[in-house]
Image: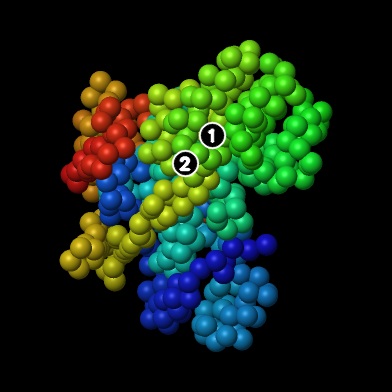
Amino acid sequence: MTSALLTDRYELTMIDAALRDGRALRPSVFELFARRLPAGRRFGVVAGTGRFLELLEEFHFGPNELAWLKAERVVSDDTLDWLEGFRFTGDIRGYAEGELYFPGSPLLVVEGSFAEAVLLETLALSVFNYDSAVASAAARMVSAAGGRPLSEMGSRRTGERSAVAAARAAYIAGFTATSNLQAGREWGIPTMGTAAHAFTLLFDSEEEAFRAQVDAMGPGTTLLVDTYDIPRGVETAVRVAGTALGAVRIDSGDLGVVVREVRTQLDALGATGTRITVTNDLDEHAIAALSSAPVNSYGVGTAVVTGSGSPAAGMVYKLVAHVDASGDWLAVGKKSAGKATVGGRKQPIRALIDGVAVAEDIYVEDPPMDAAAGRPLLVGLVRGGFVEPVFTGAAGVAEARARHAAAIAELPPQALSLSRGEPAIPTRYL
């Protein structure tokens, strides 16, 4: 299995030309960052690091890939020979997964030869742009939920592999479960789910459907009560499962009104411990609108897997330094209007006052000693081509989830507002 062709053609043609010219092996530094946050957002969430590192370990060109490239005449035979022996041998530092980011934050710093570092551009961007968009949207939903659990259930609203990535990113940002079984298997995420409307419609009556589900799953299950008439569905659910019924799910109607009516009805029937979960095209604003309603949990689909209006995080991958012909390091950057970049190696530090984040300080080259009062943000991810395993697998996801909770706790209170605004803390180049 290889991830090497999950890339754009121009990555290889650049290498082809640079090998011919003799500059391909010059030591270089690339950075992955976002010039700005999606409109109105206060912060972003880093997600995708573990996925990227696992894909990096699979990044090699086998006989089939090389044969296809040769048949398509993508690059020269000399470059094919170089690709045949390719393994990334450089170093990668970055923000640990689950961390927060702001405009200009160097989320990934890739150091190696120009050829091996530029070759990772598309792979890195495709992972981080999607995963971070989902995690950033999910974090807003978690904030809006005010401690009530959320489940990710958007598999049918995105690509089959994107669904797994989305479930992973949402869990890192604070969701508690996913409906996607592959995400549970790959990343250790708790899975959930009981029945859809099709199950109720299979039976001659709603009562028969509920009895079948309770017989199979026990009275602690969640019964979907809005296939026909919600009050009648609630009454039937309690009659079938008893007052020990675990939960009812509502997937339609004016949720703010319906939830209160259902809570009143459940209590009157003696099912005071029965929870209410709601779905129905929720996003962070709909969740916030239900903050005073007696909702116990939420299920979110389309909005979370599409980044709630921002399906890509807008990240870029740019060369910021390389060794010149004389052997000295040269800082480089674009100068074009609206797309200018700051050249040079960087050291980002989260400036804190009394444990509260106040700025994203990005030092070009090394920070001064008095910057140690802040929190350094770059950690080693790959050393000499070898991936640090602590960031991969299900264990890496669990660590990222805990790290995200700690990073959120550092934010000033206004950062959690859903209203449009500037980034929660400024980015300062020093």
Q: Residue at x 36, y 26 (%)?
A: 409
Secondary structure of residue under mark 2: loop
Residue at 53 percent across and 19 percent down: it is 264
Residue type pointed to by label 2 = Leu
User: Looking at the rendering, which quadrant does residue 4 occupy?
Assistant: bottom right
Taking 264 as reference, is 280 above or below it? below
Q: Position of residue 423 (x, y in %)?
A: 25, 42
For disc 2, the marked residue is 282
Image quadrant where one finds the N terminus: bottom right
**Residue type at the position of mark 1:** Val
> Relative to 322, is 95 on the left or the right?
right
Closest to the observer, 384 or 100: 100
Residue 83 quadrant: bottom right
Residue 413 point in image, percent of width and height? 28, 27
> Would you name the residue on which mark 1 appears?
278
Is residue 349 visible to us here?
A: no
